[in-house]
Image: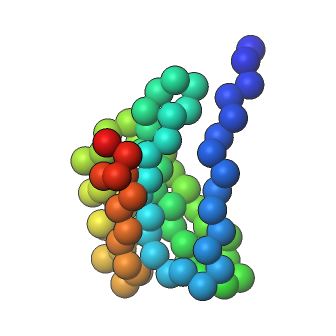
Amino acid sequence: MAEVPLPELQRHRALRAIVVDKADVADAALYSVTSCAGAGRPPRRRWFTDRAIALAHAAERADEHGFALIDLSSEAE
């Protein structure tokens, strides 16, 4: 079984936001949605195969927590 490296999980200590980004994992284009809740709380990341679904999830999380939504995935396309 081959080991699949994941992109590094960015830790933005003061950032309170939901970040959407694109990454290649095991030769597959995936979209990650990372919740950065601020200092003292670890970021959480979920993976999606479809950009629209990732954006919908990110928008829901941003609305739920009142966080900013940052879309870095459009730069990668």
Res 53 seen here = no
13, 63: nearer the viewer: 13
Quadrant location, the C terminus: top left
Res 13 seen here = yes
Q: Compared to 76, does 38 lie above or below?
A: below
Quadrant of the rendered structure where residue 40 is?
bottom right
12, 37: nearer the viewer: 12
Q: Residue at x 25, y 47 (%)?
A: 52
**Left or right, 39 with reference to 61:** right
Q: Compared to 64, does 20 lie above or below?
A: above
**Left or right, 23 with reference to 54:** right
Q: Residue at x 43, y 33 (%)?
A: 29
Q: Residue at x 35, y 62 (%)?
A: 71
Which residue is the extreme one toward the top?
1
Q: Residue at x 58, y 62 (%)?
A: 44
Total numbered labels: 0
Q: How was this image coloured?
A: rainbow
Q: Compared to 41, does 43 lie above or below?
A: above
Q: Position of residue 33 (x, y in %)?
A: 45, 56
Q: Compared to 26, does 70 lie above or below?
A: below
Q: Position of residue 38 (x, y in %)?
A: 59, 82
Q: Position of residue 74 (x, y in %)?
A: 30, 52
Quadrant location, the N terminus: top right
